Amino acid sequence: MIEKYKEINAYIQKVEDSEKIIDKESEAFEKKWKWNNYFWNTNDIIVEIGTWLWNFFSGEVSKNNDKNFIGFEIRYKRLFVTAEKTLEKWWVNFVLIKSMAQNIDKIFEKNEVSLTYIFFPDPWDKKDRQRKHRLWTLEFISNLYDITKSWWSVIFKTDHKWYFDDTLELINKFSKWNIEKLSYDYEVEIENFDKKNLTEFESIFREHKMKINYLELKKLKT
Ligand SMILES: C[S@@+](CC[C@H](N)C(=O)[O-])C[C@H]1O[C@@H](n2cnc3c(N)ncnc32)[C@H](O)[C@@H]1O
């Protein structure tokens, strides 16, 4: 079946051939609790969910050689372009995974991840039929908590206030996460806003002067 799609989408083959992309979920599942072996070091693991193009991911990889980066994306072209653009800057400490980020509990062991970035995930509609595709669910919030190391964090940004509020409600219901920072207009309200370090979506929203909702969660010692 996949062979048929390869004729239509040349990026399927490119992704398959890339040494910087794990395109089979089973291979990613096998690395659970073994990511430090994969990177040949014991450095912190930083995850970005929904890497789309490359600017934030590649920038972080090249600036932080003392950390290991794992990016999640589901689209072939986006994966391949991000891998290539990141390789232009630095080549050692990163890998991209073609998988739904909902699989984090199968890919990481408890306390395996230091920091997770979730920037502008698709919000999906409020209708039940659409809502089931959302990334932020109680199960995801719980799994994210489990895989995160104590004293480490998750940073979430979205332009959709209703999605932000729905997510906050779930996080409060789960109750274990400590809310370190919360803002409905983080460019104005949060200190140290770094306007040079933005994802593609955020750059577009800034041009339109849209307010960005920002949440920083911390796992306190358990
Ligand atoms: C709205 S874009 C935001 C991209 C980027 N984070 C930014 O801020 O510019 C969402 C990205 O997440 C990817 N995506 C959607 N659902 C996903 C999922 N369940 N797991 C991993 N990536 C996903 C999409 O393919 C898309 O590239």
Image (cartoon, rainbow, N blue to C red):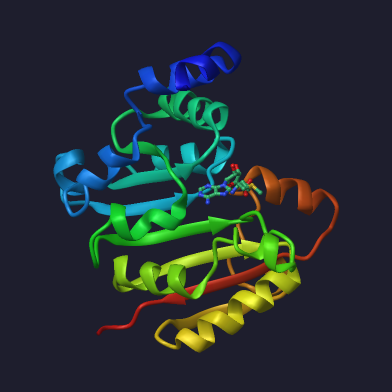
- Name the residue at 69% across, 62% down: 129
Q: Residue 179, can we see it?
A: yes
Tell me which corner region of the image, top left, top right, bottom left or bottom right, holds residue 160: bottom right
Q: Residue 185, can we see it?
A: no
Q: Is residue 194 left or right of residue 26?
A: right
Q: Nearer the viewer, residue 100 or 208?
A: 100
Q: Nearer the viewer, residue 29 or 181?
A: 29
Q: Position of residue 52 (x, y in %)?
A: 58, 39
Q: Nearer the viewer, residue 7 or 101?
A: 7
Q: Position of residue 209 (x, y in %)?
A: 84, 58
- Name the residue at 34% across, 34% down: 24
Tell me which corner region of the image, top left, top right, bottom left or bottom right, holds residue 88: top left
- Name the residue at 56% across, 38% down: 55
Q: In the orientation shown, which residue stands out farthest toward the top?
A: 7
Residue 7 higher or lower than 178, as above or below: above
Q: In the orientation shown, which residue stands out farthest toward the front?
A: 1
Q: Position of residue 15 (x, y in %)?
A: 43, 23
Identify the image quadrant of the C terminus.
Answer: bottom left
